[in-house]
Image: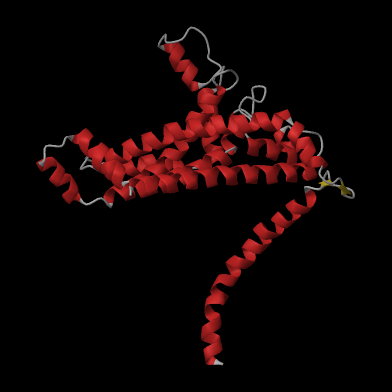
Amino acid sequence: MTKWRHASQPYLYIFPSALLMLVFSVYPIIWVFRFMFYDYLGYGVPKFTGLYNFERLMRDTQFWDALVNTLVFSAGKLLVTIPVALIVAVILNTRLKGRNVLRIIYFMPTVISIAVMSVVFYIIFNSYNGILNQYLLKFGLISQNIEWLSSKHAMLTVVLVAAWGAIGNNMLLFLAGLQGIPHDVYESAEIDGAGSVQKFVYITIPMLGPVLQVIMMLAIISALKGYEGIMVLTGGGPAGTTEVMYLYLFKLLFPISAGGPAAQEIGYGSAVGFAISVIVGMITAIYFLLSKKLNQAHR
């Protein structure tokens, strides 16, 4: 009896989390696999339609436009977030006075709700009475209001806002990697006459390789899944130019709050959700393969 009790203890510890995962992850996934073959609007009896939802998906230009927007948004966010986070981490890894306070300040956006953060930036970037336009007009830098959220500038704006919220977390990961690099390596390089740039290029970057791969993977997944800030700032506009895949899916499943179609399209939304999961999985797999080949090439 005592032996059985000791053997079962580990399973008792993981049972609550396993149960929650089963209820909130596995069970909904099973229903997604079921409903993507049905026409179901959230009420009435689901009607089996076979592969019709996937045929509709192939013809859905709004979905493919959202895919392109997702790739543009993700690429822009990565191009801003990763270099800036690395530079900030390198600076804060020095003996800079007040560096601990600066680390907290840079990390703060990570713990702020995305919705709250987006509302603040909406007030800043508002086309007519936004704080940014008011100051630009006051100092004579512009002659009329710039429509940051409802013109060709919209994608750039949402990318910068998303990057601002992600820099702190990536900075912290880079900082952890930097603190794992032995100081003896830098001291030896200084004796050989290496400058700051040479130490960064030939020591810091190569030794951050494993950390950089993990950060890139997490950043790619986060960028592909990001939609909350866009929903608050632009709602996917203007004319769908900032509508990403997850925002499009949200509008299908929750049309009342997102201004989407009149009824919940749970059947078609399930098919779209499955397609998005496959796309994100493929992009992640491609990144893993490229990382593996790069590692083999450097050995």
| Depth order, front residue of 210/227 | 210
| Depth order, front residue of 72/261 | 72
- Name the residue: 68% across, 35% down: 248
Relative to 63, is 9 on the left or the right? left
For the image, the number of numbered tags is 0
Percent position of residue 197, x then y: 22, 33
Relative to 280, is 220 on the left or the right? left
| Depth order, front residue of 149/4 | 4
- Name the residue: 70% across, 55% down: 29
Percent position of residue 69, x then y: 60, 29
| Depth order, front residue of 201/236 | 201
Which residue lies most toward the bottom here? Answer: 1
| Residue 153 visible in the shown view | yes
Relative to 110, is 204 on the left or the right? left
- Name the residue: 30% across, 44% down: 206
Q: Quadrant of residue 107?
A: top left
Tell me: residue 1, above or below residue 29. Answer: below
| Residue 113 visible in the shown view | no
- Name the residue: 78% across, 53% down: 34
Percent position of residue 132, x then y: 47, 20
